[in-house]
Amino acid sequence: MRVFDSITDRFVPNTKESAQTYRNKIGIFQGWVSLLVNSLLFGLKLVIGLMVGAVSVIADAVHTLSDVVSSGVVIWGFKQAEKPADVEHPYGHGRAEYIATLIIAVLLVVAGIEFIETSIDRIRNPQAVTAKWWMVVLIGFTILLKELTARYAEFLSSKIASGTLHADAWHHRTDAISSLLVIAALIAGNYGYPAVDGWAGLGVSLFLIYTGFEIAKNAMDELIGKPPTTEEVESIRQIIMEVNGVLGVHDIIVHSYGHDKFVSVHVEIDAEKTTAESHDISEEVEEKLEKALGVEPTVHMDPVQPGNPLVQEVQSFLNHNWNGDERITDIHDIRVVQTENHHVILFGINVRSGMTQAQIVECCQEMERGLQEKFAGYEVNIKVSPLHRF
Ligand SMILES: [Zn+2]
Ligand SMILES: [Zn+2]
Ligand SMILES: [Zn+2]
């Protein structure tokens, strides 16, 4: 969309800052757009709701008010990420955003329950609801505005590939459903069916509670710790693979503290290199990641022997037999130890999430049997990475 593009460029000029800074700016900008649009809509709905005395309109207004506060929290979260950490909270204050969100969620659910009570009361004892037609038109206008905001959020989300903004767009769109109920209530009220207001109020209240649970769930997932997105992991992998001397990347861990992220990775480096050389490579990996993603990385170095013919043989055997296996997402750290009494093939794997312990054991045994058939006399040692490593 040309219009969306020029609006965005006007308010958030894409200068030569890092991609991370630009993402943050887009996030904050979208927060302000939501906040301003929803403030306007809240004002409209509240005034109309009070004038008409319709519970459905007032409940919808309260929902919109909660959206205003949520956007405020999102903006605050982005700003918080720019602030340096302090002695008591050395990981920054990013997670405070989720606690604030949880509080909003609780308030939403409580408000929803209150409105259910009022709505049921209105169903039992309907009160006259007579709306002027311009009010109905105005509520219709709020739906259009919501759809426009949703499309814009969708546009921004694809611009910076952000799941949060995508969720925001979805939220705007579902909000419109609740306003449709309100319109139905107002029209029905004008034609002599005032009880519809109570029913619509019930619908809006249930939606309020549902929204509360949804955002609470998301905030709790973040607090408990959820996996990084595939895009996040892939972009980290890509950046590291571009560094000279890196032969492989695995076991990527991302710890999120709101917008502050801490990353650790395993990097495969030729065992022939000196410690100093390897350290240089690891520093370069750290620098690149920090610059591109604004993360704080720790690099673990795994020595590999790409020149060892036996390792090459094991590697191609594993590639040939296990690369397409959907249970295994990565094979790494392939080494072969040959001493007088020890003949061992060692490597690590990452397994698809959702596999049971029994399935993992079975998978490892299959690999072991296959390898021992091919490389007689060798012990096989497979290390399975825990679920939080990608
Ligand atoms: Zn909403
Ligand atoms: Zn490793
Ligand atoms: Zn160092």
Image (cartoon, rainbow, N blue to C red):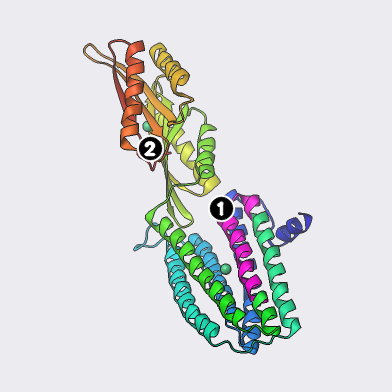
In x, y percent, where is residue 294?
51, 49
What range is drawn magenta here?
A: 157-183
Give the side of residue 250 with respect to residue 60, left or right.
left
User: Residue 348, relative to residue 113: is it above or below?
Assistant: above
Residue wearing tag 2: 355
Q: Based on the picture, tell me whether residue 134 belongs to the magenta stretch.
A: no
Ligand 2 is found in which quarter of the picture? top left
Name the amino acid type tagged 2: Met
The foreground one among 373 and 164 is: 373
Instruction: Give the mark nearest the N terminus, 2 or 1.
Output: 1
The foreground one among 301 and 180 is: 180
Q: Main SS of the magenta segment?
A: helix
The residue lying at 36 percent from left, 11 percent from top is 374
Residue wearing tag 1: 163
- Judge whether residue 346 can be spotted in this image: no
Q: Quadrant of residue 182?
A: bottom right
In x, y percent, where is residue 206?
51, 71
Mark 1 CB within 8 Å of ligand 1: no
